[in-house]
Image (tube, coloured by chain):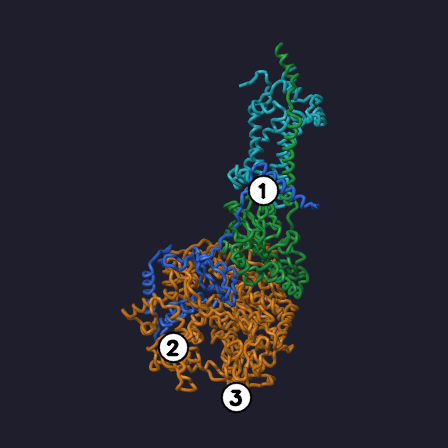
Chain colours: A green, B cyan, C blue, D orange
Amino acid sequence: MALQSLDIARRSATTTPAPGVRQTTEVAKLIDVSTCIGCKACQAACMEWNDIRDEVGINHGVYDNPIDLTAKSWTVMRFAEVEEKGKLEWLIRKDGCMHCADPGCLKACPAPGAIIQYANGIVDFHQENCIGCGYCITGCPFNIPRISQEDSKAYKCSLCSDRVAVGQAPACAKVCPTGAIQFGSKEQMKDYAAKRIVDLKSRGYDKAGLYDPAGVGGTHVMYVLHHADRPELYKGLPNDPSISPLVSLWKGFAKPLATVAMAAVALGSLFHYVMKGPNEVSKELEDELEKEDAK
Amino acid sequence: MIRNPKDLQRYTAEERANHWIVGICFILLALSGLAFFHPAFYPLTQLFGGGVWARILHPIIGWLMMIGFVVMYFRFKALNRMEPADREWLDRVGEMMDGNDHNMPEQGKYNGGQKAMFWAMSVCMLLLFVSGIILWRAYFSFPVDVVRLGAVVHAAVAAIMIAMIFVHVYAALWVRGTVRAMVYGTVTRAWAKQHHRAWYRQVTGK
Amino acid sequence: MQVSRRQFFKICGAGMSGSSIALMGFSPTSALAEVRSYKLAHATETRNMCPYCSVSCGVLIYTTGDKSKNAKADIIHIEGDPDNPVNRGTLCPKGAGLMDMVKSPNRLKFPEVREAGSNEWKRISWDDAINRIAAHVKKDRDANLIEKNADGVTVNRWNTTGFLASSAAGNEAGYLTSKILRNLGVVALDTQARI
Amino acid sequence: MTNHWVDLKNSDLVIVMGGNAAEAHPCGFKWVIEAKKDRKARLIVVDPRFTRSAAVSDFYAPIRAGSDIAFLGGVINYLLSKDKIHHEYVKNYTNAAFLIDEGFKFEDGLFSGYNAEKRSYGKDTWKYQIGKDGFAMVDPTLESPNCVFQLMKKHYSRYTPELVSKTTGTPQDAFLKICEMMAETSAPDKTMTICYALGWTEHSVGSQNIRTMALIQLLLGNMGMAGGGINALRGHANVQGITDMCLYSEVLPGYLSAPTDADVDRKTYLEKRTPKALRPNQMNFPQNFPKWFTSLQKAWYGAAATDKNDYAYDWLPKKDAAYDVLAIFERMHQGKMNGFFCQGFNPLASVANKKKVADALAKLKFLVVIDPLATDTSEFWKPHGEFNEVDPTKVATEVFRLPANLFAEETASFTSSGRVIQWHWKAADGPGESKGDIEILAALFLKLKAMYAKDGGKLPEPILNLTWPYRIPAKPSPAELLMEISGKALGDVFDPKDKTKVIVKAGEQVAGFAQLRDDGSTQCGNWIYSGCWSQAGNLTARRDNSDPSGLGQTLLWGFAWPANRRILYNRASCDVSGKPWDAKRTVIKWTGTAWGGNDVPDMRPDAAPDESVMPFIMTPEGVARLFAPAMADGPFPEHYEPFETPLDKNPFHPGNPKAISNPAARVFKGDMETFGKAKDFPYVATTYRLVEHFHYWTKHSMINAVLQPDQFVEISEQLAQEKGIATGDKVKVRSNRGFIKAVAVVTKRIKTLDVDGKKVHTVGIPIHWGFKGVTKPGFITNTLTPFVGDANCQTPEYKAFLVNIEKI
């Protein structure tokens, strides 16, 4: 019996299937950007719960701090001032792991068991198995994982898998003062989002919608956006994210193909030898040279 | 110790050492690289002390190989200039493979296949080096799209390279009497006369 | 049998990996996945309140130990109290960071004095501190307490020593502070509430 | 708050102005979001900056810092001229119908009775006309030119949209849109709430800012309603409780106004504070003042207080002058003070004009800092580079620093902004030798008591006779103290209607202030908290959060003062006949025999509607005051410019230089000279908090330091362009009192305003940095701020002053 306290759906660099008989509820975190005030309580709660403290940085001329995700900042608020047709909007988005149903990080990871996707949808990094290659970063369509300078391991949001495992909401969801972060089953979250979208449409946000990108099989962190038609307004939320075709090529069919090709060459050589025999120096030549020597 | 004083010197000690440095590096790189490439090979990391050590050592060995290869490149560059005879040889490589080398054109120190291999490896080495640097997160940080391209290039070129090295090694084994050239540095006159007649004539004056 | 492109590659992959394993005699090490263990499992929970703004959010403070004699309670985590009707478990970034306030490296640990003209702090005992302060207080009060004003009205005020009261102390401390100060005759009294 | 945090969810329209609830009170602001989500409520934000609150608002309008009365006066004018008011409410529940003295005038920016010399008003004409029956005269038709309604209409008719826009810089269409949205809530079943904070109080017209909004809420009939009210979002966790305990010179615990030199004896003192009803049948609740005061005296002096010695009235200090924090520092600066205590208070950082504060502290003989943290104040004498330039050898103040405990290390009760008193429990010991505030104060007091007992000294009686009934004298327990605050019977207390019936036995805790007596038979440390620890036990520790009404009242959670009432003036949520204005949000109603419902009625429980007992029981007239003579600077709010204004005149009174800034605000000698002029300091500055930080505390907390590490100021893109400043550049901001250096945040969220034909730029300055902390060291923002306060409560004008800015 494995030690897992959550059922495993997939694990990195493992070709055999995980135990998959038990069916657990798929969970999701919904970030309602339209009620987010950018207070960073989620950042604080994340640091506190996960026992991580980032560096005390400097002001970069913006409200964003820390300025980007790091191995010690698993979530950051991204602030965008958007002014269109004389109307100013301060769009604030909590950035962090999206917990994709089809996780690019897991696909790219070469270390068995370093990245686990639980049956409830959480994609978790297990640093003790991480070799620090950074392939997860290469694989991620959202540019989320970060390698620590201290231990060269990759870190990112775990969706507080330790809390979820005992039935609690992630620290960021629990703490969120305005309720902009909600947590529950994915189905509940979609229903909740639908209600929020109706409300937003009634306030003139005709393009309000849910961000649950199909390109990565849907995510377990979703957004309600007032401008769902233009996610890029929210400090570069990808419009239609998917695992890069390059990564799919690399960690997809290149893997078996190249292995087959290499094996084919190896086996081909073997059979060539067996069938054609060695290429030896001809006896005539040797004799000829011996004769010369004898002269 | 020279086995037979009449044997021909094909490689100097420096050349042989150079070759084997590159060769050993390559084997280590292939083993560790394959470990990251496909989960089936991941246990190969145990040869290096585990996944983390494999990840740390791979780029360092890569640097060593690259340095070794650059030296080797300049050593052998001139000898690998393609000539019309080489093209003819390459055209008729099928006969050669078939074990029938009687009608092959006369070859210098290197035959067309070897020369082609030399240039192909040089290109591959360059690609591996550049893409390897891109992937080396401990010291470099490139835009993620570049890294992704780098990863594909590194993996694809490495696979090609490994296949080529298989061919290279097999060729050496298949053509009897070749391996000793890289081990002792000498080949027999008969070997030289059969496989590299032009070179034989050049070194023996006959 | 119909095989899609994707399935084809899967089969290839599975076939290859299987064959490679067979060829090389290796099998992948089994990876054990376990979530980080829940750090509050046996911590002691105490109901308290956030000391910052006057939303007065309820918080739960988690300490190590089970209040047994030899286990020193050490605060390891603070989060919102879900029962509190106002915050319902939520906190703001200040409240969410409360633990770092409690554990701030700038917490004072013992009484100190900076002598007149000195450039440094000197650690002193509580007794020394209270004795020295009380001596100052009594000297100033005895010298400057005004018993009667110019019109002969009893006023009993002492306005040469002032006090600024905390808005973060509890009601009980606030009440006691008021009770003591008024009866020392202090009138130069104000609180953070003003500003 | 007249209402409470959760009640915000019952609102139809939320105004955030003079505050930034999302930034300073995110968890309370949640209930605004809930109102939006569940009630389809709308949120309006009016602020010089597009704030975090504005980020989730439905409508935002910019305003020049310090021009709120102009804006709100304009709203009043809109409501009155478009007749968008709640007529029944205004007529019955406010003093609209009351007739005012014929001599009352408002001319050229000044009310009648102004004394320019003293900078204050004589209030002889600011009063009701009193009839022969001794009651105030009223005109129920509201048509008399001297009734409050007509005076008010006339007063605000000057606040035209054109003049409002010209003064505030708010575009006229935005202003009118907000008027229109507010006016909709004049419907009886619609409510509007206002969330304000220090953005209104920290002005030289602070109290009047709030009053202007109160007038609007009364005109719209929103006071006393669920989802209505005037909601001050207060600062510290227990700032409400400490205010209630009255740790300031003007009042004794429970807002009992403190005796002054004029109150020569107890009788004089009580007479002045016990008003007579101004209208028939009114409750005139302050008539109970003697009961509250006597119970306090008994709590403090016990058996030593008897009717023979005026209950030791003489032992209480009599106040001769203002002793607010600005006045204290002024006295200190003049060298009139020798000793000073800072308990959990960091005045070097939080009081205006840091230089003046530091100079003042250096004149003390001794300074005692009682704090959990190493505050900036405790090291005012210590050089910290350019952040605190000082020569310690020249500072002769002896400084003591005593380590105090934090919330987690104490059992205590805190009172929230919604007046809910909640008990909390100690979780762990404090670090090192730190002690609780109670223990520290007790140690000092007991030491002094011993010294006075042994050596004698001046006026030892109050010290030696102060009640100290605590089981462990050196460690009075919070429970003992809260019981003392709540009050108990010293002798049997009888029912006033039936003198033979004992309602509280001697020694028992009283159930509430109705049981307090002025004959010495009860003691109570703070009458408004009376009943919080009754015979039923500690009600502040109750944790039943059930909410049967769905309004979020949770009457069994903790204890709200007064009398566990959650919405003040809730009688006004019903019409005159006792029927709720909005039955869907019934707070209370007349049940036929008594008042009842979802709150503790703010009314005598058996006062039948036909008795015409009006809802505002704390006024002798029983109604709310649209005209308020108690204000120092005018019975109607009037727009005055901040003391440092970018304009050379008050646009409302361009011809009167005396009426530029608040004519009744106190300015100390020498401080007028420290005010800057627009030609040298052309930009309007406003200071504020950030959500990541709490005043000067969280700069000591690592998590918060990570979230907002470094000092910055905010400017508009236009100003940045004019001054060649790029975002991220280091800038120097100067006022006439000093300078700070910070990183520039160039933002679209601050706009250049068009005010009176001038372009006015705003510089936003967050306050949280200092030279002690784990954040990057910074300058104390109050280096810049002016040393002048509100005319009524002396809160310093931190929100509107002048600066200049340059790139460095």
Name which residue type carries label 3. Gly
Q: Percent from the top left, x then y, of residue D504?
A: 40, 80
Q: Quadrant of residue D365?
A: bottom left
Report the mark closest to the observer, 1 or 2: 1
**Most distant residue in the left direction:** D454
Q: Secondary structure at mark 3?
A: loop
Q: Is residue D713 above or below residue D290?
A: above
**Which residue is disc 1 drawn over?**
B39
Asked if labels 1 and 3 touch by Cβ distance under 8 angstroms, the answer is no
Do callouts 1 and 2 point to residues on the same chain? Answer: no
Kindly report which numbered mark, 3 or 1, lies closer to the viewer in this rendering.
Answer: 1
Q: Return the chain for callout 2.
A: D
- Residue at the image point whose x is 28% and y is 70% from the top: D453
Please tell me how crowded label 3 is: few (under 14), some (14-19), or many (20+) other residues with Cα within 10 Å.
few
Does dot 2 land on a helix, a strand or a loop?
Answer: loop
Depicted A47 relative to depicted A258: above or below: below
Q: Which residue is mark 3?
A: D131
Chain of residue at mark 3:
D
The local crowd at label 2, few if under 14, some if 14 to 19, many if 20 or more residues have their Cα within 10 Å, is: some
Q: Position of residue D585 (x, y in %)?
A: 58, 75
Left or right: B78 with respect to D570?
A: right
Which disc number belongs to residue C38?
A: none
Identify the residue position indicated by label 2 in the image.
Answer: D508
> Disc 2 versus disc 3: distance between alpha carbons?
45 Å
